[in-house]
Image (tube, helix red, strand yellow):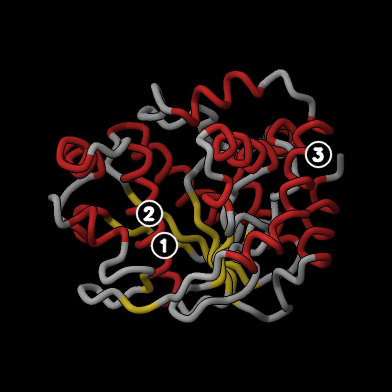
Amino acid sequence: MDIEKQIAKTIKDHGLIKKGEKVVVALSGGKDSTSLVYILKKLGYNVHGLMIDLYLGQWSKTHNENMIKFCKENDIPLTIVDLKKELGQGICFIKSIVKKKKNLTGCSVCGTVKRWILNKHAKKLGAKKLATGHNLDDEAQNVLMNFLKGNVLLGVNSSPATGGKPVEGFVQRIKPLFFTPEDEIRKYAKSNNFKILYEKCPCAFGTYRVETRSWTKDLNNKQKLKVVEGFQKILPKLRGNNKMEIAMCKKCGEPARKELCNFCEVMNCV
């Protein structure tokens, strides 16, 4: 598979980026987001890397060093948000406190914190779009996890352009790798000799996501694509029947569906 052509097609078919728009790419330091920012830059888009230092020991330190070097070599502007300066603590401390008080998984807490920070800083950087490295495997797992949980509406915003359209207060999130298989991205990163870590997050164990990833690994790429495309077909009806009003969080001023956004509800426990 030529994933550069695949990504260009996804961008064109779903109107993800207009020429000249500033695209902030959420960088984790892994193969997906690294390949994404490299390809978007190669395709001529105005990209800016945005990374969060989560303070996960040597794993975070190595990712930071790799991305600083990678972005410098490829003439990509990079902003790294220091989590301790932003919130006063590293992610492990935050997760440990919230897990006890709200019975949330560490991945749920981490995801909530990262989404809030990425949206906040993407706006500061003047981004029109916020691109993430979610790939076909991630999206197939999402569909199946939500189905097994008995609540497919959890994925109502899942599409190449998250939510289907821009929402006030949110930088429009896009997923150019939405239809690109993970194994093809790994091949691409290795063929380009990207100096990155290929290991999963050291905290990613014992979660429903990890279990789902394990039992879906035997699905081939065509089967994963059918899962994702099938869900995309029913999304318009799901969204039409489940419209939610977006207001501003009374504490931080970021978008929220309730009086407080998910981030502020989490941080109230810390």
Mark pair 3, 2: CA separation? 29 Å
Q: Earlier in the sequence, mark 3 or mark 1?
A: 1
Rendering coords of residue 249 (x, y %): 28, 74
Q: Quadrant of residue 120?
A: bottom left
User: Residue at 40% across / 23% down in the picture?
Assistant: 205
Residue 172 lies left or right of residue 83; in this view the side is right
Q: Marks 1 and 3: in contact by CB < 8 Å?
A: no
User: Residue at 51% across / 32% down in the picture?
Assistant: 197
Mark pair 3, 1: CA separation? 30 Å
Per the image, the residue denoted by label 2 is: 114
Rendering coords of residue 165 (x, y %): 63, 73
Rendering coords of residue 56 (x, y %): 30, 36
Q: Quick one: SS at disc 3?
A: helix
User: Residue at 22% across / 37% down in the picture?
Assistant: 99
Depth check, mark 3 against mark 1: the one in front is 3
Q: Which residue is at the front of the view, 223 or 234?
A: 234
Residue 58 sits above or below residue 28 on the image? above
Residue 173 lies left or right of residue 18; in this view the side is left
Residue 78 lies left or right of residue 57; in this view the side is right
Mark pair 2, 1: CA separation? 6 Å
In the picture, the quarter occupied by the N terminus is: top right
Depth check, mark 3 against mark 2: the one in front is 3
> Which residue type carries mark 3?
Lys
Q: Earlier in the sequence, mark 3 or mark 2?
A: 2
Per the image, the residue denoted by label 1 is: 118
Per the image, the residue denoted by label 3 is: 226
Q: Marks 1 and 2: in contact by CB < 8 Å?
A: yes
